[in-house]
Amino acid sequence: MPQNQQRRCRRGLAIALAGCFAMSAAFADEAGAVRAFNRAKRTEPELFVFLKHMPKGGDLHVHVSGAAYSDYMLDAAIAKGLTFDPSTAQFGTDPSKTPAKQLLTDNGLLYRFLDAASMRGWMGGGQSGHDHFFETFGIFGAALGARQRMDVLEEVIARAKSQNEQYMELMTGVTPSQANTAYFQNLPDSTDMPHALSVLRPRLVKLLQEAKPYLDQMEKLGKRLGQSSLTSPANPMTIRYIWSCNRLSTNDEFFAQAAAGIYLAAHEPRIVAMNMVAPEDHPLSRQNFARQMKIVDFLWQRLGRPNLTLHAGELTPSISPPETMKDRIRKTIEVGHARRIGHGVSIAWEDDAEGLMAKMKKEGIAVEICLSSNESILGVAGIHHPLHLYMAHGVPVFLNTDDEGVSRSTLTLEYVKGALEQGLSYTDLKRMARNAIEYSFLSGESLFEGRDYRRPKPAFHGCRRKGWVPSRRAQALMARSDKLRVQLRLERAFVDFESRFP
């Protein structure tokens, strides 16, 4: 080899070794955390203690009504003086029924409600987990309504904050009830979609005007949580909202719901996406799916093209015909413009599943994995779950709670389940925590080049070192991007956490 080539080779090797050494130094603390994680896996309690403190990025698939625990609904029903009907396990105002406070001294009545309002006591029997799960929402409706809205939000957000979560996207109401009533009156015929949209446009403007002060009021909850606001990335916990449409609505109702969600997501920064809810295996969901996707496509093209995250593939052969599952996820992406998929359990049944996952990897379409609810609703757990199929094909995934109050879970428990039942490593869970922010709908540029977590932007090359202080350039970039700020907060949280394990 010529001498000049030898010099170039030696110089290249030196640079490569220096880079490897720098990378090793930057991630030196991770090895201690990996060892501690592996020791903690001896027992579930040890693992829970370890993972409760681990930074968990975000929970992006959260139905607030299903995230509230029925125990606190019981407290509210008693405080409101509601009565309880043992035959339906529901609270109400009928004075001929049992006073709610009697549940405190009658264990039979107490457990009748708590077990009916969640998966707490479900043991199988004659009812499927699927049916029991969805029935809970009708059971606890009045009891949940007895609580103040802000109290429910505080419960859900405070629980997440206590587990070292950095960010949440909450599916919850974002407009006052009187505004909703006015918006949904005398809905236009959606058969003529251009005309229907023209009728709704002035109402959409009014709905947006009503949403802003409503969300401003919700900001005040931040002070109850020890923050300056709920939505600022300068706080330890940052919140955004998602509008939900009901799959089981009529076409005209669904059109109006989707128009509102897409319009608000395009014009109000605190509302970052629209989603679709209700059982996907219901006959109406199956019959209306193609029409609903056309509605979403039409409205998305005309109302600002905001981010959409859509439930898709929450199906198995036991509750769905195979034909329904062969293109449900693909059409949700290609026709419905989904940038994230909720659940995605039926991916293996898709026509050309490998081609679809290659597309999802290339386009950065992430999957919101909800292990506990998939097990409760679909009976899918362990080797039956497609989590590792997605991971093997490079599709970005991360863990979520879905309805933690109904499932009697938390994001920490989802991480525990991921480790013990899915065999996820510490580095797997850490990547998922990062994925939850990278594939969130926070505005602004990413902290990372090309979604490669080994490559922070140049101004942040030292952000994983103890004592790092952002330069002026770094501060300028932070000021322009909410996503970058939350990602940086997560990286600094990992520095603090991993420094505990030499």
Image (cartoon, rainbow, N blue to C red):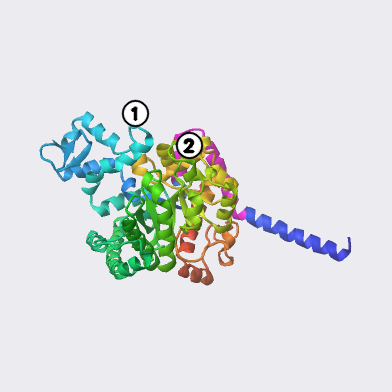
**What residue type is disc 1 on?**
Gly
Magenta region includes residue 231: no
Q: Mark 2: few, some, or many residues within 10 Å (few <14, many ≥20)?
A: some
**Magenta segment, principal secondary structure?**
helix
Q: How many neighbours does mark 1 have within 10 angstroms: few (below 14), some (14-19), or many (20 or more)?
A: few
Earlier sequence position, callout 2 versus callout 1: 1
Tell me residue 433's x, y (percent). Answer: 49, 51
> In the orientation shown, which residue stands out farthest toward the front?
191
- In the picture of the structure, the residue carrying the numbered disc 1 is 126
Q: Nearer the viewer, residue 388 or 257?
A: 257
In the image, is residue 288 above or below residue 375?
below
The answer to whether one can see residue 490 in this image is no
**Identity of the residue drawn at 43% across and 43% down:** 412
Callout 2 amino acid: Ala
Which percent across, then down, holds residue 207?
29, 66
For the point 72% across and 61% down, the residue is 15
Q: Which residue is mark 2?
A: 381
Q: Which is in the foreground here, disc 2 or disc 1?
A: 1
Q: Quadrant of residue 98?
A: top left
Magenta region: 25-52
